[in-house]
Image (tube, coloured by chain):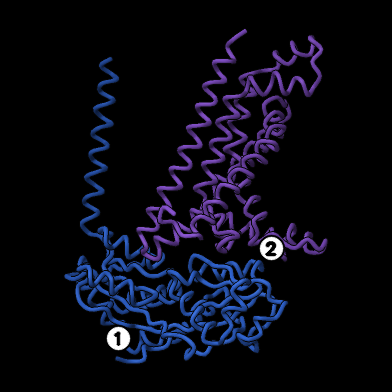
Amino acid sequence: MQAIFKRLLMSVAALGMSLALTMAQAEQEPTRIAAAASLRAVMDELVATYRTQHPAASLEAVYGASGSLRAQIENGAPFDLFFSADMAFPQALEAGGHAAGDVTPYAEGRLVLWSEDIDASTLTLGELADARFRRIAIANPRHAPYGARAEEALRASGLWQTLEPKLVFGENIGQALQMVHSGAANVGILALAQMHASSMRGSTFHLIDSSLHQPLENGFIITRRGGDDPTARGFADFMQSPEAQRILEAYGFSMPRGD
Amino acid sequence: MLGLTSSDWEALRLTLRLALISTGLLLVLCLPLAWWLAHTQRRIKVVIEALVALPLVLPPTVIGFYLLILLGPRGVVGGTLERLGVGHLAFTFTGLVIGSMIYSLPFVVQPLQNAFQAMGRRPLEVAATLRAGPFDRLLSVVLPLSRQGLLTAAVLSFAHTLGEFGVLLMIGGGIPGQTQVASIAIYSHVEALDYASAHRLSLFLMLVAFTLLTCIYALNRRFKVVGVMP
């Protein structure tokens, strides 16, 4: 009986110690960037470049759907910067008092047509009406920015009515790409940035005329939590540097059309 | 009606249809499999048991992605159907049924297998000496004796399908009226920050599920009372 009691006491002590350790670690948490999943490739490189310039900085990126990240930040997630795939989510955070400063536009995305089976470089939106294209994947226009712009482009081309029965909807632009990758959808309206992922190198695509839709502006904020973090401020400044702009362009983003 | 849009109703109807069809098919198909697993002495049994549990391991959207490859025009299954002129199964209701069956497989096989194991061979042997034919033995011995396991399997599979999201979104493509089930419609409402619609549909889905499950459990209670009578 006594032995059992002693063992119990020891495990409680061990538990307490591990808790204390976790809390001690929490005090020296790195600066965390929450970024839209569609930014993964370019953000990894941006972070790596910043780290080589500032070896002492402790900086890491986590990825998720912009909408989910927004909800997480509203509920106290430990993120110091938020890079969204649109402007609306960071603007909502700013309006809700969760940002330290204004929303900064940092890049503009472009839509492309891409297919796993055929060379899409000579493809036009109008040809999607062909019977050989049975399923067209886009991101959900209701909540995914790239989906909403894809719908606008199809409407502006007068194709929405014809093509709507063929559309399938990914939860986000990444899932739309997977639907095309698997061959289940013949073609997709996707993001130019996705064509620059390492697994997509060398694939050919058709760049969709950006005058057919509202600009795909991407904005970021420093969160209230990151407001006093010098690394968060440093990274925000770094985003304006020619070095960061060069990386963004290399990954298929253009610079915001100015304000 | 009740503040739900017509596409919400459509999504609910699809969800119920999907849950009923896939649960029914799963029960029929898993009966022999679970029976075999409960009684076989062969060593391959452990491999099959592990295989049955595998759908629990992978994230749902990943299962959905592999199913999309399998059922799509370039996959083994989809491609063969395509050549037969039937058409592939990606983004179809049939594809959804197959997806949710695979995803719910362990939830049906395991309770059934446990029930069969608990029952043992003895009741069947007795029934055979009373000259009950195989079909008679199944209907009047096996099924009544393993009723609890059957019920658990049916309820788990049904409820699991109602709430399924990742697999169904991936292989279904969320097409309104065809493959957009209630869980996807709810998710889409939340993502679009239309919380009022999300709350209404969630509440309604839970009410429907609660009512159905209560009825099933109540029915089971009644039968149990009848069952103890000699």
- Give the numbered dot on residue A169: none
The residue identified by callout 1 is A240
Measuring from the top left, give residue A187's x and y in whole percent. Answer: 63, 76
Measuring from the top left, give residue A11's x and y in whole percent. Answer: 28, 31
Residue depicted at x 26% and y 82% = A237
Residue depicted at x 39% and y 60% = B190
Residue depicted at x 51% and y 41% = B159
Vertical position of residue A156 compared to residue B119: above or below: below
Front-most of residues A155 and A243: A155
Residue depicted at x 51% and y 55% = B9
Image quadrant in which the C terminus of chain A is located:
bottom left
What hue does chain B carry in this figure?
Answer: purple
* Amino acid type, label 1: Gln
What hue does chain A carry in this figure?
Answer: blue
The residue identified by callout 2 is B72
Camera-near label (2 vs 1) is 2
